[in-house]
Image (cartoon, rainbow, N blue to C red):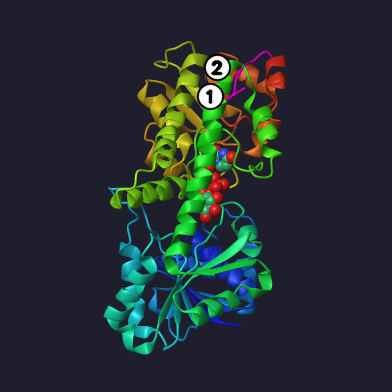
Amino acid sequence: MSRVGIIGAGYVGLTTAACLAHLGHSVVCGDVDADRVARLSRGDIPILEEGLLELVTEGLRSGRLQFVVGAEGASRRRDFVFLCVPTPQSDNGAADMSYVEAAAAQIAPVLDPGTVVVNKSTMPVGSTRLVQRVLEEAGAGSREVRVASNPEFLREGTAVRDFLNPDRVVIGCDDTATAVRVSELYRTLGAAMLVTDPASAEMVKYASNAFLAVKIGFINAVANLCESVGADVREVALGMGYDKRIGFEFLRPGPGYGGSCFPKDTAALNHLAESVEFPFPILEGTIAGNRAQYERMVAKVKAAVGGELAGRTIAVWGLTFKANTDDLRESPALYIAGRLLAEGARVRAYDPAASTEKALASVPGLEIVVDGYSVCDGADLVVLLTEWDEFRWYDLDKVASLLTVKSIVDCRNLLDPAAVRRKGFQYTGVGR
Ligand code: UDX
């Protein structure tokens, strides 16, 4: 059992804290937001994440999980302190390291000798050394504080499962003894363990996310091509996926990728490539292609209403960047809804989990409706932007009776085109 501090109670920090407490470690999680800390201490989880509530409740009950305001309280008398603060995208595409640097400077004076600081957030290559330097300059230098990179690979919606059943655990550290100490935290998980140098560990994270983004970009491009040649991309992806070298995952075409990771991490890797004057056309093409995919969805809606969006009313099903999360960050749905509004349409949206306040803050002028049928009432057509399972089971006769143009634009290929058409709808999918 180790004593672990976690700085930051966002998606990554909170999942890491709850899961490490579940594995038997004693965890103190610090966040600057006093309100969030108070809520978490009552077992009130601010995000939608399957299984997290149960683990936080278990941790609080057993006393192995505690929440405190501020970073220092989570860093005193700890064997490990995980930095899980945001690294948002800055104007030039690079990751903004100011929260990381501030957190490191803040905790440096209170760390015990021998504490290992672990970079968990996605941080650019060189961050392990940067954090080491900040800690030393802020007064931890004489106390043998070590830094390791240990990137997270959690997907929102399945973060707890991903943490407890990882494909691999990656640890980057110049000092093998320290890396082994970090690996001990995860020993009971029985996962593949890669112990390497800091730069390689940091690169694993960016390369993995960028590769997955490229995979999505590729299948979206194939889907667009399928539309021109009359092939069905779902059959194509299936045929490709049986090849074990390719695999079935991340070959779902859609409106383009979004979320808090892929857009930011592809931009950051591209920035890194530019900074060393390395041309990375696959990555540049993926980033540009993703934006073009958003626009392609707008064009599909436009075509479905006969070419003119002004004066039309569009119903939207789904606003989050993917299903089973309430996260709206970099959501293609918000971008597309905003573009439909900009073209003069009235846009009414329903999402099972998204916060109305956050959606309206991102897309002013959007109307939020509380259920998936009412949103269609009086609309011309409906566009499905997030693959929430409930949309599969809607009564299409009822939907048809509410829309003025019987048309569904299914940007996630969630529905069965034949079944939709049988109900008299015009159906538009992606790549089929
Ligand atoms: C991602 C990585 O998967 C995870 O390992 C990393 O730690 C954080 O970033 P996440 O952002 O939660 O996780 O979502 P993910 O499930 O990977 O989906 C990202 C985006 O790609 C979503 O917008 C999703 O809809 C889209 N996507 C995914 C597709 O369009 N097609 C696919 O086949 C898969």
Residue 352 visible from this viewpoint:
no
Q: Is residue 174 visible?
A: yes
Q: CA separation, marks 1 and 2? A: 7 Å
Chief secondary structure of the magenta span? loop
Estimate the x, y position of residue 24 in percent, counting from the top left: 64, 78
In front of the other: 428 or 248: 248
* Disc 2 Cβ-to-ligand 1 distance below 8 Å: no
Find numbered disc 1 in the image and state the secondary structure of the residue it sits on.
Answer: helix
Q: Check disc 2 and report its element: helix, strand or loop.
A: helix
Name the residue tied to disc 1. Answer: 224
Q: Residue at x 49, y 35 (%)?
A: 256
Residue 255 coordinates in the image, percent (x, y): 51, 32
Residue 45 in percent (x, y) is at: 55, 60
Q: Name which residue type carries label 2.
A: Ser
The tag on residue 431 is none
Q: Amino acid at mark 1?
A: Asn
Q: Residue at x 52, y 66 (%)?
A: 40
Q: Residues within 10 Å of mark 1 (few under 14, many from 20)?
A: some
Within 8 Å: ligand 1 and the Cβ of disc 1? no
Q: Position of residue 145 (x, y in %)?
A: 40, 83
Q: Are marks 1 and 2 in contact (CB under 8 Å)?
A: yes
Name the quadrant containing residue 330. top left
Q: Is residue 306 left or right of residue 130?
A: right
Give 408 or 240, whichever is nearer the viewer. 240
Q: Which residues are magenta?
A: 423-432
Disc assigned to residue 228 = 2
Query: Which quadrant of the figure contains the N terminus?
Result: bottom right
